[in-house]
Image (cartoon, rainbow, N blue to C red):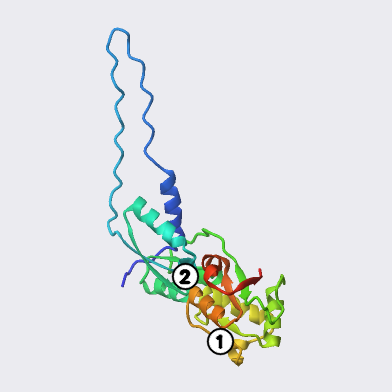
Amino acid sequence: MRTRRFPILAAILLSVFLVSACGPAAAPAPTAAPTSAPPTAAPTAEPTARPAPENPQLILATTTSTQDSGLLDVLVPLFEEETGYTVQVIAVGTGQALQMGQEGNADVLLVHAPASEKTFMADGFGTDRFLVMHNDFIIVGPAADPAGINGGAVAVDALTKIYESGSPFISRGDKSGTHSKELALWKAAGLDPATEKPAWYSESGQGMGATLTIASEKAAYTITDRATYLATKENLDLELLVE
């Protein structure tokens, strides 16, 4: 177990961008030689070698939504190349990722539950917190749309229709940021299927990609982040219905 306290992953992503934007200073233009002396070539600037990290192993705890979106497949190799670190990615729900950071089992976190993040920082478990990217939540479901929510603009209204129609709904049920958002929306609607456990409401207990697959197989509705849906929709029989 690591004993030092750990920054939120935004520091990593910012490092990728900042390091990528930096480089050795350009060599000065050569000055014209006097006519009485033969011309000499300008010296070539030697690139400055980047010192190797003292501890090159870095553990990144992130959400399954970020992993399933394919974003890390692009960013992690760039970061490793630029910095010399080796990143071990552990994809879990936001709640688990925050717990890993709190216990000292992860160096950096990339999560999406602002209220929980602020508590994490206030309790002294992190050193830096940055906002680094944007994603949003959508409701997807079968093209037949038995609850009639297609084109709606208010998530609470859509969930109310799903509840009243008893249409199949798959919850992640894993204390992730997406699950927390879902529960908040049910609460705003004055409904609580997670406690009532009607037959039409199921919990996958899995990440976003797996939950989307289950919803597709069961012709059910679910709440997802847009990035994961876009990255996997070719393999799903689910339509974007409410955004």
Q: Residue at x 29, y 35 (%)?
A: 46
Which x, y percent locates residue 234? 54, 68
Residue 128 in view (yes/no): no
2 over 85 or under it: above or below: below
| Amino acid tagged 1 | Ser
Residue 63 numbered mark, or none: 2
Which residue in the structure is indicated by mark 1? 202
Residue 180 is marked as: none
In the rendered view of the protein, which quadrant contains the N terminus? bottom left
Looking at the picture, does residue 195 appear above or below residue 144? below
Q: In the rendered view of the protein, which quadrant contains the C terminus? A: bottom right
Residue drawn 53% across and 76% down?
212
Measured Cα–Cα span from mark 2 to mark 1: 21 Å
Nearest the camera: 221 or 234? 234
Q: Is mark 2 on a helix, strand or loop?
A: strand
Nearer the observer, 234 or 183: 234
Question: For the image shown, how many numbered marks are present on the structure?
Answer: 2
